[in-house]
Amino acid sequence: MSTPNNAILLVDDSATMLMSLSCLLGDRGYGIVTARDGAEGLALLQGGLRPVLIITDVAMPRMDGITFTGEARKLMRFVPILVLTTQSQRDKRERGKALGATGWLIKPVDVTQLFRILDQVLPPQVVAKAATAARPFAEGGALAGSAAGLSSNPFSSGHASASGDPSAAPSRGTASRTHRFAR
């Protein structure tokens, strides 16, 4: 399968979320591949897709994001998997963590914080390559709603980051940018 450079696999049954994330991350310089549920995302991986990152929703038809995370982890041992969802139940977070999720983000997520997390979980050369392909975009607020903070624990009860200590996040010389979507 031909994979766009720096491809991020987005798995969500919401067309609005897929479009929003695709625009946001595409403007940031990442290639985007989308799937409407976990079964479709898994089929893409089984067909040879090798993304640099996976972002998945939890509540989806056919295969939920937690099950997808476990199956994807079997195929993609070192690829970061971020779970982006409106659900914050502790049991789901713990199950996602046990199955290999790298981090847990609660919608709506502040896009500046999302970019910081990408800078933390992706290798520096991937971030740098995306930055060379990035398109400029407007200053703004949050993805799919109002601003939301992120805690230092990716599986905390609030919002998540990809690192246990935000002060330990590596600086890669990339400034976080934000994007506001028209409502």
Image (cartoon, rainbow, N blue to C red):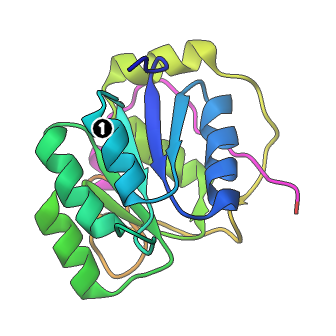
Can residue 104 be seen? yes
Residue in front for this viewpoint, 3 or 141: 3
- The secondary structure type at the circle numbered 1 is helix
Image location (x, y in percent) of residue 12 = 51, 59
Instruction: Name the side, left or right, on which 21 lies relative to 23.
Output: left
Instruction: Name the side, left or right, on which 67 lies relative to 37.
Output: left
Tell me what residue is drawn at x 41 percent, y 57 percent: 56
Residue type, mark 1 in image: Leu
Residue in front for this viewpoint, 169 or 100: 100
Tell me what residue is drawn at x 30 percent, y 50 percent: 81
Looking at the picture, does residue 83 appear above or below residue 129?
A: below
Question: Which residue range is magenta in the image?
Answer: 165-182
| Dominant secondary structure of the residues highlighted in magenta in the image | loop
Magenta-drawn stretch contains 87: no
Tell me where residue 53 sits by quadrant: top left
Image location (x, y in percent) of residue 110 = 60, 60
Residue in front for this viewpoint, 101 or 47: 47
Q: Mark 1 points at which residue?
A: 45
Tell me what residue is drawn at x 74 percent, y 46 percent: 179
Image location (x, y in percent) of residue 133 = 61, 15
Instruction: Name the side, left or right, on which 82 lies relative to 86.
Output: left
Residue neighbourhood size for the residue with mark 1, other residues' Cα within 10 Å, grouped as few (<14), some (14–19), many (≥20): some
Magenta-drawn stretch contains 166: yes
Tell me where residue 134 sits by quadrant: top right
Image location (x, y in percent) of residue 69 = 25, 58
Can residue 177 be seen? no
Tell me where residue 127 sits by quadrant: top left
